[in-house]
Amino acid sequence: MVNYVSPGVYTIEKDISEYAPSINTSIVGVVGFAGKGPTNKATLITSQNSLITTFGEPNEGIPGQALEGSLEILEQTSNLYFVRAVGSGATDASALMSIGSCPAVLVSGSDVTGAAYGVDVDLYLQIQVYDNDGTAQFATPRNYSIPAGTATVGQAQAIRSIVGGSIEADKVGCFDGGQATDTSLGLSGAIVGQYAGSGASIGVSAYSDSNFNTGVVAGLSALYPVSATYVTNYGLSSGYGTDWTLASAVRVYGSTFINEGASSTQYSLLSLYEGNGYNGGTRTDGTASGNAISVTQLGGGNFNLNVVQDGVASEQFNSSFLASGNFIEDVINTGETNLTSDVIKGNIMYSQADVAVTKQQNFGDTMGYLIYGVTAPDGSDNFVAKTQFLYPSPLNQNGTADPGDPVVEAYVTEAPGGGRWSKLLANTGANLAGGTNGAEDATALIGDSTVDPKTGMQSLDDETINIGLAVVPGIATQSVQNNLITLAENTQDFLALVAPPYGIGTTQDAIDWTNGKSASTAGSRTAAINSSYAAVHWPWLKVFSVFDGKDRWYDPSIFAARQMCYTDSVADSWVAPAGFQRGRLTKPVDTELKLNQGDRDALYSGGNIINPIVSFPQQGITIWGQRTTQRSPSALDRINVRRLMIYVRKVILQSTRRFVFEPNDEFTWAQIEGVINPFLDDIRRRRGITEFRVVCDSSVNTPVRVDRNELWTKVLVKPTKTAEILIFEINLTNQSAQLGNL
């Protein structure tokens, strides 16, 4: 403490307002399989809608009932952590997006006198753009007047200022090599259509006067048709895929790179995780399900890649292959880290293998630059693409603005370096396909606690998520259930809820199962269950599934967890989640087996530990027991007491950590008592305990313990017991008896 040595007024603030915090006891951990969504991590789910959006809809093809159980439990709690395990053999859903080049026409760098168009002399262009389906984008070909003086230097700059190319809405644009006055594209400029693909084309006519008159005299031979696939220079230094034959009217097609086999080029999209929930399709009612991908081509090198989920657009990524734009592998994650998408991951592929790509510096760079970082790689690294060529008829060799109906020929060529002006092809919707869930896998459910992050159910071992209940619905595998119970005991954080498998048989079969004597049955168990951190409920319950449109048998542990959350909302976690007040189930329509009084007696007594679910004739289906699986008789053989102790432990740990490294003396001891006493008294007033005592003094903090830097506190509680057996003694007396004395 600071020492004050001069006169004055000083203030010191000390916070001695410690109190025990409140902790949510209705957070449920669910482990199981799903058709989509994050794997091997505890994902917070706060509503039924967020569960379906994240992990997909339930169906009988998915092992277990994790999704079905979560939907039921979320009706009574808004905090659930879902851990999705991946079955053996599960695969990603996928879709291949084709890549293509846009059609382009080079403009001669000068007229016969050496004058640059749009700088020194006039140029008049008439342009029509066609998409990959051959649909014209302008009602009539569009006229562009580029008079001398449009730009002071750089023909490409002059043409671009009139034709366009700088905004995404432009259907056509003029592009150069990145420098306005270089000796190649910057000197001349390429007129490029917006659409890529072998069916896309651009028709361009050049004129010498502003009337756009037809005829040989008005036609201006200033255009070079560019091959969309071949970029070698034919002995010329510039090498932009043209034979340098000037024309006054041309129609040029784009190209589509093949997406299968050797020398193929494509953008491969995979679902972010494995599962058939990503597969696009159509439900029986005609609505879309799963995920589909669409691509919208924009001006220049840009395109939008859209992710559609259940028929509704969910994500959009503005992308390109350019370093200066939104490079596609920066915009969309290539793996499962640094996620930008909740649905997909993507990679540019060459010869069906992922490659380390080089971002294109200019829209005019070749595909070879993207894949290899060089414009034209060796001939062994060709790119196979499909395009079309125009064979003009005599009718359109006179310089007319409309080249007429072309005679086209599909052509596949190997092109060193590939085409230029590339982007993803437009696509109205390609379904992801091929995703599978894999087979039920106990190892995946159990997970691994030795890796970081932990996997499977081991990811529930995290104090930051504070679960109070855990369940693996629909899975009766002994190893899975035993590991869940072991995890509950080791962490002391939650109660594990398990159940015998569906169709176990009679009451005796169910008892044998819990006692480890059912080796001959499906879902066999060879070891008895004995833990105060677990509870067993039985039999299974019939519930109508809105997703399947029929009745299905549900794991009873689902409804055990549901009613415990309900109990927390109407009472407290130390109140029994059973009986007509808090154990009545309204959704199930039937029980797997009708239990009579004898069945209930056998299940619940004589060292047996099954909580029966009973269908009463008038009161309905009700949970009629609240035992833990502890065999030895003590207060902890009841669910309400175990849940009370889990709650007390968590609160004491959280509220007393602040005292670590404080002086080990009477003042700190009194502070600890001052935190715990009001907390326990509150539970007493809420009928959780009948009496308590907190001892933190020299009687427990002996000199030896203090010397070891240990501070001990003894907490004694008497938990409130439940009235499970109500007995009314009815006595008959004669008329002379004095009832007040009996």
Image (spheres, grey):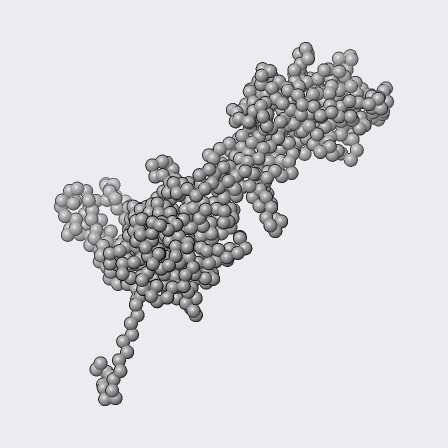
Residue 259 seen: yes
Q: Quadrant of residue 451?
A: top left
* Residue ranking furthest to the bottom: 736
Quadrant for the N terminus in the image? top left
Q: In which quarter of the image is residue 7?
A: top left
Q: Quadrant of residue 310?
A: top right
* Residue ranking furthest to the front: 520
Quadrant for the C terminus in the image? bottom left
Residue 273 seen: no
- Identify whether 307 is placed above or below 424: below
Residue 355: percent from the left, percent from the top?
Answer: 52, 25
Q: Residue at x 74, y 34 (%)?
A: 135
Q: Which residue is drawn at 31% across and 66% down?
A: 724
Q: Which residue is drawn at 34% across and 39% down?
A: 449
* Residue ranking furthest to the top: 235
Q: In this view, does 115 lie to the left or right of 301?
A: right
Residue 498: percent from the left, percent from the top?
Answer: 37, 52
Residue 718: percent from the left, percent from the top?
Answer: 24, 60
Q: Is residue 465 left or right of residue 205?
A: left
Q: Residue at x 61, y 38 (%)?
A: 430
Near-viewer residue (149 or 552): 552
- Identify whether 356 is placed above or below 557: above
Numbered label tally: 0
- Identify whether 29 is placed above or below 161: below
Residue 510: percent from the left, percent from the top?
Answer: 35, 56
- Identify whether 614 is placed above or below 328: below
Q: Is residue 580 left or right of residue 58?
A: left
